[in-house]
Amino acid sequence: MRDQEPVVIDPTGSDIHGEAARLRERGPVARVVLPGGVEAWAVSGPGVLKRLLTDPRVSKDPHRHWPTWINGGISPEWPLYTWVAVRNMFTAYGSEHKRLRTLVAKAFTARRTAALRPRVEEIAAGLLDRIAEAGWRDSVVDLREAYAYPLPIQVISELFGLPEEKGEELRSIVDSLFHTSADPEEVTGTYTRLYAVMGELVAAKRRSPADDMTSALIAARDDEGDTRLSEQELLDTLVLMIGAGHETTVNLIDNAIHALLTHPEQLALVREGRASWDDVIEETLRSDAPVASLPLRYAVEDIELDGLVIRQGDAILAAYAAAGRDPERYGKDADRFDVTRADKEHLAFGHGVHYCLGAPLGRMEARIALPALFERFPDMVLAVPPEELRPVDSFISNGHGSLPVRLGSRAGGV
């Protein structure tokens, strides 16, 4: 396989599923070239990917296990720099990962998530009121802009105690983090702005602790060593939880709306009670993973996979979008959105020790947002042909740049 020409990943993500199909044609593991000429292995076979996600020979710590990073081959101008440079549970390995995840889990409890439900319902209802009040029911509204995006960002901001006036700046920063074709000036500027905002948040919560996740993370201690998160770990954990945490939910809601509007027969099944909103959510996660490809992991030692060897120090890309539509796993109709599909198991939130802590929150937000939207605007239709929709400018984030719809004559009032 090393003799094959690598697939050059399109940094703009202009055809995520077409590129995923090309990866699968190379087999469950294929060589790729990431932005900046960085080489890696993309793992698209769901069975192989699931094994590697739990394999102790695979690390997420570049400081210990990626020679390209250790030897200075990655500069701060690289579009994926922040994804690799952070020091938090996302990039930790072994006992260090366990320590960090334990500390974060103490703050991000099931109780805290469950307690958010009434507030999520309130935010969703308010956004829908705003859409109707603006008189958009007879014109075009961008549902990504007006609904799929503001709901998760408001939830995550309130969860972490981020001041409301920082919401727009946070959104701009997160958009830039996922902009994988960004130029060097944007990359370094985003890095600087991001840590300024996180630093201000931590300083404010140290002065005035509150019942929020940031205050809980500051206070969290390891029971065994009675240690807290270091300052850098704290900042980088906020970067992970606030940044990447809400983008996945934005794309989940966005992709589910798009799937139902382009498959009205599937929406009819839900309305007739022959499928549930949970079916919609899980099938959306399978067929359109919110994170298409997640950087990066590294081989701690040589790993042999069916005649292929991933060498020690090689970088590994988890190709979730490709895995979710693998025909060997899901059949010849793997590309089809089918809420009645028996096998909806997916890896969209990862697997093993790095399974996404925020998955329950993301699912809860979608369970509230989707039925509320389709009940409020039952005649809603796309305002443009599906082929005219453009993806976000990223090979990591899998969503639409905009989602224009007409709400219809039966749009619910306020």
Image (spheres, grey):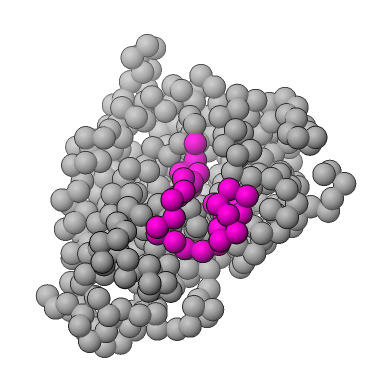
Q: How many marks?
A: 0
Is residue 82 inside the magenta stretch?
Answer: no
Chief secondary structure of the magenta span?
Answer: loop
| Residues shaded magenta | 324-351
Residue 31 versus residue 98: which sits nearer the camera?
A: 31
Q: Residue at x 65, y 25 (%)?
A: 57
Quarter holding the N terminus?
top right
What residue lies at 75% left-to-right and 30% top-to-bottom?
A: 304
Q: Is residue 300 above or below residue 114?
A: above
The percent coordinates of residue 100 (x first, y second) are 43, 26
> Which image quadrant is residue 161 in?
top left
- Up/down of 130 relative to 288, above or below: below
Residue 210 picture location, percent across and down = 19, 37
Seen from this angle, which residue lies furthest left?
Answer: 414
The residue that appears at 42% across and 67% down in the rendered structure is 259
Decide if residue 152 is on the left or right side of residue 318. left
Residue 274: give x, y in percent of width and height. Answer: 30, 61
